[in-house]
Amino acid sequence: KNQVEQSPQSLIILEGKNCTLQCNYTVSPFSNLRWYKQDTGRGPVSLTIMTFSENTKSNGRYTATLDADTKQSSLHITASQLSDSASYICVVSASTNAGKSTFGDGTTLTVKP
Amino acid sequence: GAVVSQHPSRVICKSGTSVKIECRSLDFQATTMFWYRQFPKQSLMLMATSNEGSKATYEQGVEKDKFLINHASLTLSTLTVTSAHPEDSSFYICSARGMGQDNGEQYFGPGTRLTVT
C-alpha cells in the first residue's frame, strides 16, 4: 500500500530559527514528490516539485531534498518568519494508476516571536 | 499564472438542502480536476477525479449520488452536495491539472467552508 509519513506531527520554533521537516514514502513506482504549504482555512500552495533525478530544489527560504534510494525527503526552512506558521504537506505521485497522489498528514509548524 | 478559484468561499445551508460549489481554472485549461474534503486537523482526502467531458471517478466510500461532480468545460468543474447533513460540514478543496503537466503538478483552489445546520 502506498503511504506517505511525515514527521514531526507538529513543531514550534522561534522566529529566525531554521527547521527541517521529514517525509518518508513507500509510493512505487515513483513519479514525483511535492511539498505544499497550507495556511489555516486556505488551499495548499506549491513550494517545490521534484522528480526522480532531482535531489534538491529551492524556493526562496525553502529547500527540499530527495533521496529516491531511501525514499526520504526533507523540507528545510531557513530564517523562519511568523508567516511560515502553517501546515506543510508532502505529496507523492506514482507513475502508474493515472499518476495518483498520496498525501501525508502534514506537519503543523508554529513560529513564535 | 496557474490560478484556481472556488465559489463560494463559505456557505451555510440547512439540512436536506443541496449546495453547489464551483471550481474554475482562471488562466489555464484544466484537463483534470480533483475534489478533496478536509476535516479539522486532518489532511486532504481525495473524493473524486474528473476529466473534462467524462464521468468522474470516485474514491472508495464516496457516494456518487450524494456528491455530484460535473466537469463540463476545460475551466469549470462543479461539486453539488445533495441533501446535505451536518456530517457533510467540512472544508472542500478543488485542484486542477493542466494540459501537458505530466509532472503531476496540481494547483489548488482556496477552498469552500460548508456548514450544514
Image: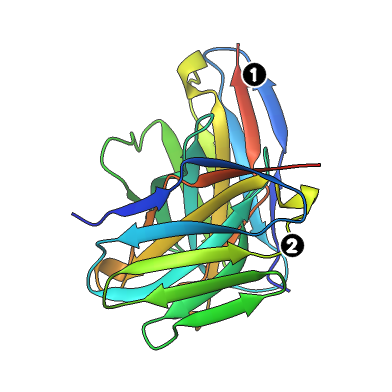
In the image, what residue occupies the spot 48% across and 38% down? B37
Q: Nearer the viewer, residue A79 or B39?
A: A79
Q: Chain of mark 1?
A: B
Extreme-right residue of the structure: A113
Disc 1 residue crowd, few under 14, some 14–19, many 20+, Cα 10 Å: some
Where disc 1 sits, the SS reads strand
Q: Is residue A35 left or right of residue A41?
A: left
Q: Find residue B39 and report its horizontal and vertical position in percent.
A: 50, 31
Q: Is residue B90 above or below residue A36?
A: above
Please, what is the three-letter code of the amino acid marked with disc 1? Answer: Cys
In the image, what residue occupies the spot 43% across and 44% down? A105
Asked if one can make out residue A95 in the rendered structure from this viewpoint, the answer is: no
Q: Is residue A82 left or right of residue A94?
A: right
Q: Is residue B50 left or right of residue A76?
A: left
Q: Is residue A60 left or right of residue A87?
A: right
Extreme-bottom residue of the structure: A53
Question: Are tags 2 and 1 found on a single chain?
Answer: no
Residue matched to label 2:
A79
Residue matched to label 1:
B13
